[in-house]
Image: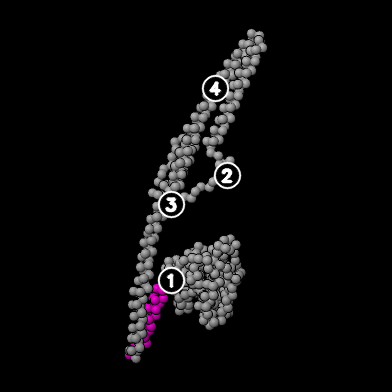
Amino acid sequence: MTIHPLPPPKQPIGLGRVPVAHWFLATATVAGLTFVAGVVIVMTMTARTAELNPRPEVAAQIERLTVALIVVFALLLACGVGLAVIVRYAVLKPIGQLTEQVRTVAGGDFDRDLHVDRPLELAELSSHIDSMRARIVSAWRTAADQTEELSRSNSELEQFAYVASHDLQEPLRKVASFTQMLEQRYGDQLDDRARQYIHYAVDGAKRMQLLINDLLDFSRVGRVTGEKAETDSGTALDRALENLSATIEDTGATVTRDELPRVVGNQVQLTQLFQNLIENAVKFRAEDPPRVHIGVRRDGDRWEFSCSDNGIGVEPKYADRIFLIFQRLHPRDVYPGTGIGLALCRKIVEYHGGTLWLDGDRDGDTDAGGDGDGDGDGAGDGAGDGHGATFRWTLPAAGDER
C-alpha cells in the first residue's frame, strides 16, 4: 500500500548536522595518532636509555619494561581494532539500515517492515516503530473503508434530499389542497367533527412539509453552498436582522451588537445561524419586551461569539437535550415548530470548525431561552427563572487578523 509521503524531516542544527559515523571516525583518528605518538616516544626513550650504558640489572629492568609496553600497546591496538569492528557492524550499519527503512516508509510505502537484528536496543526500537506503523496502517485502512461508506451514505442522502424536495412535497400539497377543497365544497353538509378532522388532516400535511424542509436544510449544511472563505460576520448579522425585521417590529424587540469581526466561513450559513438564534430569543420571550445582544471577544486564533437574551430561560437539566434534533420541551400548541433549529445551528458551527454551547445566566446559573432554534421548539416544561440565556460559539478568525 502506498499513500501520500510524509513531509520532509526538520534539518538538524549545530553539531547535530554531523553524522554519527563522522564522530566515530574523528575519535578513532585522534586515538590512532595518540597511539602512534606513544609508540614513538617509548621507542625514542628506550634508545636513549641504551646509549647511557646502564648497569646490567638496570638494562634487564628496562628490557622487561619495554616488553611490557609492547604487550600493552599490542593489546590497545587489538582493542581499538575490535572496537572499530563493533562500532561499524553493531552500531553504524544497523543504524544505517533502520534509517533507510524509515526513509522508505516516510516516502509513502507504509507496508515496508521495519526490523534490525542488532544491537538489542536498536532491535527493540525498530520493533516499537514497526508496531506503531502497523497500527497506523490498520487505522488508515479502517478510515478509508469508513470514508468509502460515508461517501456512499452521502450519495444516498443526496438522493433522499431530491426525493424529499420533489416526490414527497407534491403528494403532501395535494392532500392539503384537496382536503381544503372538500371542506369548501361540502362544508354545509359536514358536522363540526368532520370539519375538525379536515383541520387535523390539513395541519398534519403542512407540518410534514415543514419537517421535510427542515430536514433538507439540515442535510445541506456543508454539502450545498458550503464553500468557506473570509467573510464579514457583521454582514451576515445584517442580513439575518433584515429577514427578521417584521418579527422584531411586531414584538418590540431590541437587538444590540458589538463590532463584529471578519471570520472564515460561509455567509449564507452564518446568516442562518444568527437568524435562528435571534428568532429563538424573540420567540421564547418573557413578559418584558425582548432584548437580544450579539457579543464577541477574541480567543487565540478564534472569535468567540455570544447571543444573550432576557427570555424565559430553561432548567440546567435540559441544557444537552435542546441540541438534539426534533427535541421539544414545549407543547406544539404553545410554541409551534419542528425542534431542529438548535441542532442545525450546532451543525453549522461544527462545520466551520467551532463549538456551540449554552452558557450560564447573568447570575451564574445555567439556563437557556427556549431551545435555541428559529423553528419554534423550546423550553416549555423546562422553563427557568426568566433570567434569559446566553449561547456561545466559536469561529476561526480571518488570516489577516491578529
Task: Report the residue marked by disc 2.
Answer: 13
Residue 163 position (above or below residue 100): below
Residue extending farthest to the bottom is: 188
Amino acid type indicated by mark 3: His
Q: Is residue 135 visible?
A: no
Q: Is residue 375 visible?
A: yes
For the residue carrying disc 3, how many other residues have a C-alpha within 10 Å: few (<14), some (14-19), or many (20+)? few
Write the residue at 38% across / 49% down.
Answer: 1
Distance (Cα) linking label 1 and label 2: 54 Å
When asked about the image quadrant of residue 218, the answer is bottom left
For the residue carrying disc 4, how many other residues have a C-alpha within 10 Å: few (<14), some (14-19), or many (20+)? few
Distance (Cα) linking label 1 and label 3: 35 Å
Distance (Cα) linking label 2 and label 4: 39 Å
* Residue 193 painted magenta: yes
Amino acid type indicated by mark 4: Leu
x then y, percent, for residue 119: 48, 35
Earlier sequence position, callout 1 versus callout 3: 3
Earlier sequence position, callout 1 versus callout 2: 2
Amino acid type indicated by mark 1: Asp
Earlier sequence position, callout 4 versus callout 1: 4
Q: Which residues are magenta?
A: 189-214
Distance (Cα) linking label 3 and label 2: 27 Å
**Residue 246 vs residue 81, the one in the foreground:** 81
Indicate the quadrant containing the C terminus: top left, top right, bottom left or bottom right: bottom right
Relative side of 371 to 69, left or right: left
Task: Report the residue marked by disc 4.
Answer: 75
Earlier sequence position, callout 2 versus callout 4: 2
| Residue 86: assigned label | none
Task: Report the residue marked by disc 3.
Answer: 4
x then y, percent, for residue 28: 55, 30
Task: Report the residue marked by disc 1.
Answer: 217
